[in-house]
Amino acid sequence: MEDKMINGNDFSSTGLVQNAFDLNTMLPKESVIDVAVPIKGLLLKESVVVCDASENSVEAHTSNISHFCTGSYNYPMFLKLGRADQTLACRLSDIVVYSGKLVMSDFHMMEQAWINRECERVQPKEPIFVSILLGGQKFRANLFDLSLTGMCVLVDKKKIKAKAGLKNKRMTVLTQLPCSQSIMKIRGNVVQVHPISDNLLRIGMNIAIPKKDTQIVEHYLAERKREILDELFLNFMQLLNYREMKDQYF
C-alpha cells in the first residue's frame, strides 16, 4: 500500500505512543497546522488555524469546514507537526459549521513519520467481491480499498492455508469494477497482513494494474471520490440547515 501510517478506516492503538506532551507548546495559538481527515479510503488534507489549546483539547478554525463533516462523532484525524514530520493522532469531538470551528481531543503521538500518499485511495460504495489466486488456491474475498498502486482485500481466515508466510507472497486478483463490463487481472505482492476480527484478515498489496485497465481504474477512483465529497457536502448542508431551523425559535 502507499502508506503504513494512516489507513483511513480505523483508529486502533497500533502505532500510538502514550507520551505526555504540552498541547500549548506543540500547537501554539495562531499556528497553521496541516490536518489529514481519513474518510472512506480517501485522505483529505486541509489546514487549520489554532484558536486555543488546553490540557486535553484544541479549538481551531478552517476555511473548508465541509471536509470535516463526516457525520460521525469522535472521528479520527491526523495532524502534521512542523518540519520534523511528526504526527499527532486525535479525534474530532465537536464541530460548529456556521463559524468554521472544530474541537479536537484525545491526542496521541504516532510512532511513524508523516508519509504522503502517492495515489488517492477509495473504498467501494457497495460490496465488490473478487477472486484471489494464491499458489494453488482460489477463493473469494471482499475489496476493501483500491488505488492505482495498492489494494486491500478482506479474506476469511479459514480460506488461507499458510497465514504465517503470507507476507511478500505474490497474489493475483480477478475483479470487475461497477463502471466496467470487463474482468481485470491484477497481480500484486502482499505487504500487510492484519487480523481485524476472529474470522477476517485484511491483506494489503502493492499492485501493478495492466495498462489496458488503467483508464478503467482511474475513472472508478474519480467517480468514487466525487461521491464521497458529495456525501460530505450533504452532511455540511444538513448541519447548516439544522442550525438555521434552530435559530428560528430564538
Image (spheres, rainbow, N blue to C red):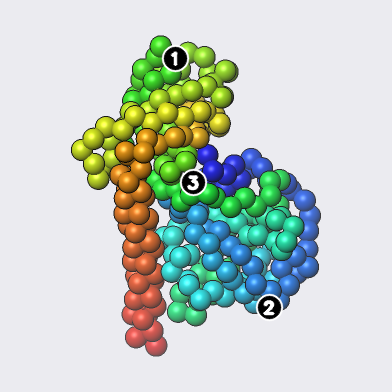
Structural distance between the alpha carbons of marks 3 and 1: 29 Å
Query: SS class of the residue under badge 1?
Result: loop
N-terminal-most mark, 3 or 2: 3
* Distance between mark 3 and mark 2 Cα atoms: 30 Å
Classify residue 92 by image quadrant: bottom right
The residue that appears at 54% across and 66% down in the rendered structure is 46
Q: CA distance from mark 2 to mark 1?
A: 56 Å
Does residue 3 sit above or below 158 in this rendering?
below
- Depth check, front residue: 139 or 222: 222
Judged left or right of residue 85, residue 166 is left
Q: Are marks 3 and 1 in contact (CB under 8 Å)?
A: no
- Who's the residue at 51% across and 76% down the image? 63
Q: Which residue is mark 3?
A: 9
Which residue extends farthest left? 181
Image disc number at residue 135: 1
Mark 2 or mark 1: which is in front? 1
On the image, numbered disc 2 is attached to which residue? 30
N-term-proximal mark, 2 vs 1: 2
Q: Amino acid at mark 2?
A: Glu
- Residue 133 in the image: state x and y as whole percent: 39, 20
The residue at 41%/11% (across/down) is: 136
**Position of residue 122 measured from the top left corner of the image (x, y, whole percent):** 41, 48
| Position in image of residue 155 (x %, y %) | 42, 27
Taking the spot 45% from the left edge, 24% from the top edge, the residue there is 171
Label count reads: 3
- Using the image as rendered, state which of residue 162 and residue 121 is in the foreground: 121
